[in-house]
Image (tube, rainbow, N blue to C red):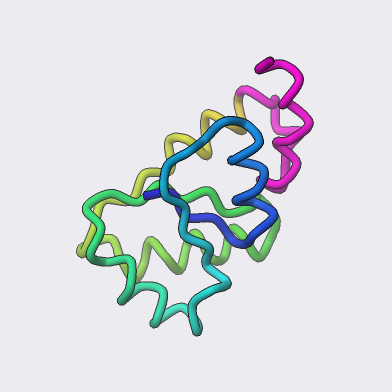
Amino acid sequence: MVVVEGKRDTNALRKLGYSGRVLEFHKFRGMIDFADSVAKYQNLIILFDRDRKGRHLTWKTIQLLQRRTNIDLSFKRKLRLITKGKIMFIEQLVCYESFLV
């Protein structure tokens, strides 16, 4: 299960060809509701933005879920390496759409 912050992030992943399930953080009523809802998934791929808010959400998610589910940050790290740190927001990934055609 992939978790992003909002609808634009989901749209960016779809444009790049991702067809799996995506959960949007902003559809939940706060961090506790989010944590309780996603704890049922065995694995979570967190793709929050790299801005201050995204880093805070990532940290808080790890704090609340580290003993309840497996949190995978490797894709976030790989995206940072592939884009050479130029992408701060997941929605900016659409810039790379032409490379995948």
Compared with 7, 37 (above or below) is: below
Characterize the magenta stretch by its predominant secondary structure: helix
Instruction: Measuring from the top left, give residue 80's x and y in whole percent.
Output: 62, 32
Which residue is pictured at 28% across the width and 60% down the height?
66
Q: Count how many numbered circles sit on residues in the image.
A: 0
Which residue is pictured at 45% across the width and 68% down the height?
60
Compared with 35, 16 (above or below) is: above
Residue 86 painted magenta: yes
Q: Is residue 58 left or right of residue 93?
A: left
Instruction: Measuring from the top left, give residue 81's x and y in whole percent.
Output: 60, 25
Q: Which image quarter: residue 56?
A: bottom right
Q: Which image quarter: residue 67?
A: bottom left
Q: Is residue 67 left or right of residue 35?
A: left
Report the span colored magenta: 82-101
Which residue is pictured at 51% across the width and 35% down the height?
18
Tell me the quarter of the image containing the C terminus: top right
Instruction: Measuring from the top left, give residue 46's x and y in whole percent.
Output: 46, 50
Instruction: Measuring from the top left, give residue 13's x and y in whole percent.
Output: 59, 40
Compared with 54, 2 (above or below) is: above
Which residue is pictured at 64% across the width and 51% down the height?
9
